[in-house]
């Protein structure tokens, strides 16, 4: 999984390598509260996450599928 831009204003894009399994993307803030949770279809390659309503700060994007998981950190600045 890769994310661009890693410093986001209104949105950030998550790029994944589809592995044929459904995926779950969870976004948590720096104190561990879930601010967004989405089920992604198995064929997803790019998924846009809106950060427009997020407060400024660090967030963690966790992608989980039946074949594993990965996580990245982004910073939201308006």
Image: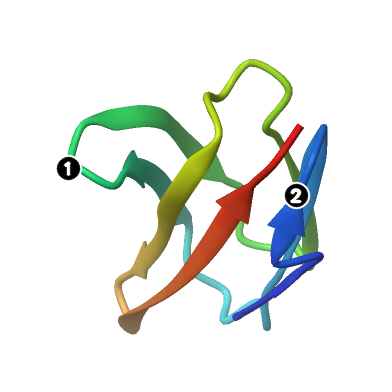
Residue 32, labelled with which disc?
1
Q: Crowding near pointer 1: few (<14 within 10 Å), some, many (20+)?
A: few
Question: Quick one: SS at disc 1?
Answer: loop
On screen, 63 above or below 49? Answer: below
Is residue 23 left or right of 4 when viewed as pictured?
A: left
Image spot of residue 78 (x, y percent): 76, 32
Residue 7, labelled with which disc?
none
Q: Earlier in the sequence, mark 2 or mark 1?
A: 2
User: How far apart are labels 2 and 1 at the CA level?
Assistant: 19 Å
Residue at point 57%, 74% (across, down): 20
Location of residue 67 by image quarter: bottom left
Image spot of residue 68 (x, y percent): 30, 83
Residue 8, labelled with which disc?
2
Question: Quick one: SS at disc 2?
Answer: strand
Q: In terms of depth relative to the viewer, which is nearer, 39 or 5? A: 5
Colouring method of the image: rainbow
Residue at point 32%, 42% (across, down): 28
């Amino acid at each position: 999984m890769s994310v661009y831009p890693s410093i986001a204003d209104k949105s950030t894009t998550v790029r994944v390598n589809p592995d044929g399994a459904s995926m779950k993307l969870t976004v948590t803030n720096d104190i561990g509260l879930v601010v967004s949770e989405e089920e992604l279809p198995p064929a997803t390659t790019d998924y846009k996450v809106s950060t427009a309503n997020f407060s400024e700060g660090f967030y963690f994007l966790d992608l989980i599928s039946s074949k594993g998981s990965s996580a990245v950190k982004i910073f939201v600045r308006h």
